Every structure is written in C-alpha cells, then in structure tokens.
C-alpha cells in the first residue's frame, strides 16, 4: 500500500513540476519576445485595446456586466476568477511592456568578469525586481479601480 501511495505521489509531483516548467517557459518566451521592438509595440497595442474594452464595458454597460458576473458566479466561481485574473494579468503585462519599451535593455545581463561587474549586475537585478513589483501593483490597481468604478456606477 505504501508503494502504491508513493508511486501516486511521485507521479503527481512529476506532473506538477512539468506544468510549472511549462508555465515558466511560456512567461520567459513572452519576456524574450519583447526584445523585438515591433513585437513589443504589438503587445502594447493589443493589451491597451483589451484594457480599453474592459473599461468601456464597465463604463457603458455597468448593470449588464454586474448581472453577467452574478449569473456566472451562480454557475461556476472559477470562471469569475479567470476573468478577474485576466484583468489583473492584462494590466500587469501592459505596465511591464511599457517599462520594456522605455528601458529596452531591462532584461539583458552583462557577461563580463570585471571588478565592478557584480555591482552592476546587482543594480540591474534591483531594477528588474522594482519594475516587476510596479507591474504587479499596476495590475492590482487596474483590477481594484475597475471593481470600484463598477460598484459606484451600479450604486452598491
């Protein structure tokens, strides 16, 4: 019985690791694709359009959006969480894309072995972390602002 449980647990851990690696590859692929300025402009355009569409839906038809969320929430909460995660993710990636457009060499690393290269690498790492934190904060702010405007417009 122990062997059967161990095999099942090992299979689950292997599956989980493969899924996490696939997600990391997807994110890294998107980050690497942003090195091309043309691709970056396309990212910014598409993400901006999606953000504008979300905001337009809330501003133009707030009662319909609220009713749709209520109906979907009664059927399946996961769909609501996916939509909320999409709004957050779009805001986060849009902010990160704008930072990448402003700072093209954000993700490049130096491969020199100079005396002060480790200091430069550390400063670059701090800058990356700050930009990712700001991008996540922008995604959260976009989601919260959208929810607040929705609730204010419907009067709740």
Image (spheres, rainbow, N blue to C red):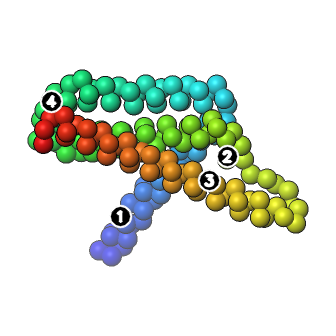
Q: Is residue 144 above or below residue 98?
A: below
The 10 Å Cα crowd at callout 2, few under 14, some 14 to 19, many 20 or more, is some
Q: Gap in Å between the C-alphas at discs 3 and 1?
A: 39 Å
Instruction: Quickly name the residue at label 4.
Output: 63
User: Looking at this view, is 92 or 61 the one in front?
Assistant: 61
Image position of 29 with respect to 39: above or below: below
Report helix, strand or loop for mark 4. helix
Q: Earlier in the sequence, mark 4 or mark 1?
A: 1
Image location (x, y in percent) of residue 33: 62, 35
* Marking on residue 128: 3
Does residue 47 appear anywhere in the picture?
yes
Q: Which residue is mark 1?
A: 8
| Neighbourhood count class around disc 4 (C-alpha, 10 Å): few under 14, some 14–19, many 20 upward | some
Q: Which residue is mark 2?
A: 106
- Mark before the other along the chain sequence, 1 or 2: 1
Tell me, for residue 86, which label it has, or none: none
What x and y, as percent, mark residue 35? 67, 36
């Amino acid at each position: 019985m122990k062997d059967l449980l161990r095999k099942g647990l090992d299979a689950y851990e292997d599956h989980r690791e493969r899924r996490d690696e696939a997600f990391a590859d997807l994110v890294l692929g998107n980050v690497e694709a942003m090195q091309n300025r043309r691709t970056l402009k396309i990212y910014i355009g598409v993400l901006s359009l999606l953000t504008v569409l979300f905001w337009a839906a809330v501003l133009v038809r707030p009662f319909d959006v609220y009713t749709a969320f209520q109906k979907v929430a009664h059927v399946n909460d996961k769909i609501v969480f996916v939509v909320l995660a999409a709004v957050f993710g779009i805001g986060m990636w849009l902010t990160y894309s704008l930072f990448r457009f402003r700072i093209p060499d954000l993700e490049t690393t130096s491969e020199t072995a100079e005396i002060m290269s480790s200091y430069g690498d550390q400063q670059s790492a701090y800058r990356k972390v700050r930009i990712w934190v700001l991008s996540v904060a922008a995604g959260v702010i976009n989601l919260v602002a959208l929810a607040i405007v929705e609730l204010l417009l419907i009067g709740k």
